[in-house]
Amino acid sequence: MQEPTFLILTALAAEPAHGYGVLRAVEELSQGEVVLRPGTLYGALDRLTEQGLVVMDREEAVGGRLRRYYRLTDAGKAELATQVQRLRRNADAAAARLRLAFGGGPLAFGGGL
Amino acid sequence: MTVEWERRCERLLRAYPRSYRNHRGAEMVTTLLDMAEAGRRPSRGLAVHLVLCGLRERFRPPARQPLVWAGALLAAVLLGGFGAAAGTWAGWQTAASVPSDSELRALNAALTGMPAPAAVYREASAMKTPNALVRADGTSDYSAERVRAALVADGWRITSFEERTGYVLGNFTDDIEKAERIPMKSVSYTATRGGLKLQGDGDAIVNGDVMYGTEVWPRETAAVRPLTVAGVVAGVVAGWLLAVAFAFRMRDSGRRRGWAARAMSAVALAAAIVPGYSLYRDAYQVMLYAHGSPYPYIVYSPSDVIALQPWTAVSLAALAAAVIAVAWPRREPAASVIEGIALPDRG
């Protein structure tokens, strides 16, 4: 799974969000490293919807503007959990290798993993 | 600013297919306006991004419809064949035009000394080179000077001129040994004029019977083969885009109309395989044709043994039926709240 897709699923994990809400959440979650543009976002939402990972939660029409809110499906939550486990496993493995490389000393990035 | 940007967003989103705009357009505009209000200034980069995403979306068939992939692929390949034929035709439009029938007859009369109207035959070579042959049989004297002078007066530069003497057998019944040998003079000539080539020959028998044939054809221009290839590419892209767009129309047309259109589309594609195959064979011959614009020659084509018109007619009729099935007006359902604020559909 590519990083933007992972971040979109993460953005929808806690509560439903609309298009701009997802864009903002992805930027915050990645600390500004990933800035999605609308074409990419909606392309990803189309794909995730087709895969059954994301579903529309509700529509709101306020002031002549349509907002659609999206949420994770159970399959989406399971997929995100699987990805989290995979990333954690890989990160732990990488951290362990780095500790060996540095002779068991504390890691430069603070051992936060 | 907001109104102006909203209008611009709607214009940019026209890069997306209509069915996509109907589904996503309104919420995408909302997201773009939200971004602008949050201080993300609309930029040229964002505009280009939207247009590219929209164009990419036009290539994407509906999800979970594997038959659409097969149909779109077949449509792309078939339209590539038609594109090749169109490209070849366009390429030859850049070549020098073959003289008119009256010009050729005038040249023939000057060459042969026979003022009677001669027959003109127009054909196409295996490369679709448009060529014209003027033939004249009759009674006249033979004069090399007259042939040369006629060509030069018509603006041709003579590149070869060869005379031969021989005889023909005549006045015999069943014993060829007793046949009379009648002296004959033959002439062959080639010439060029601008982008045109000319080749002719004549047989003049001493008793006055003459037979002349002069053929004119254009040199191949640099555009013919590249435009043939470009035609294939353009046809493939157009075929895929049209098939994908039509697949969305069929999907959104309701069950009965959708299936009727699918069936008609299948008939249209199946019937188009025959002309499509023939057109690819023709394109293959165009690409393989000898360079240097030699004397126009033809090769076997499937169209020599298969009449392509009936298949093409069946294909077009089935296609028209499929289009009618999805495009015929039907009663509109009551407008919902969401439809009420959907993007105005400007095609």
Image: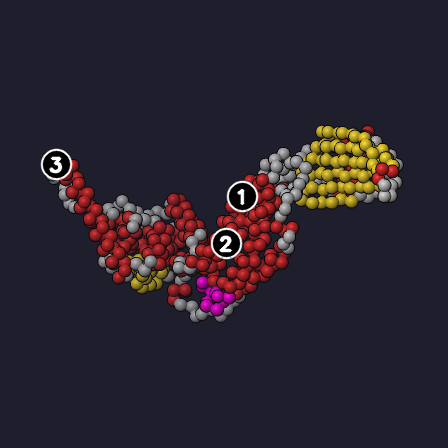
The amino acid marked with disc number 2 is Leu
* Spatial CA span between label 3 and label 1: 62 Å
Q: Is residue B113 visible?
A: no
The amino acid marked with disc number 1 is Ala
Tell me if B212 is positioned left or right of B125 in this view.
right
Task: Provide residue A62's location: percent of width, then percent of height.
Answer: 33, 62
Task: Provide residue B143's location: percent of width, then percent of height.
Answer: 83, 31
Disc 3: which residue? A103
For disc 1, the neighbor class at 10 Å (few under 14, some 14 to 19, many from 20) is some
* Spatial CA span between label 2 and label 1: 18 Å
Task: Provide residue A63's location: percent of width, then percent of height.
Answer: 35, 61
Tell me the tag on residue B74: 2
- In the rendered structure, does residue B258 fall within the stretch colored magenta? yes
- In the rendered structure, does residue A37 fall within the stretch colored magenta? no
* Viewer-side label of 3, 1: 3
* Viewer-side label of 2, 1: 2
For disc 3, the neighbor class at 10 Å (few under 14, some 14 to 19, many from 20) is few
Tell me the tag on residue B230: 1
Closer to the camera in the image, B269 or A61: B269
Name the chain under label 3.
Answer: A
Chief SS of the magenta region: helix
The amino acid marked with disc number 3 is Gly
In this picture, which residue range is highlighted in magenta?
Answer: B251-261
Tell me if B171 is positioned left or right of A80 in this view.
right
- Please tell me whether mark 3 sits on a helix, a strand or a loop: loop
Depicted B171 relative to depicted A29: above or below: above
Name the chain under label 2.
Answer: B
- Please tell me whether mark 2 sits on a helix, a strand or a loop: helix
For disc 2, the neighbor class at 10 Å (few under 14, some 14 to 19, many from 20) is many
Residue at 67% over, 44% down: B124
Task: Provide residue B231's location: percent of width, then percent of height.
Answer: 55, 45
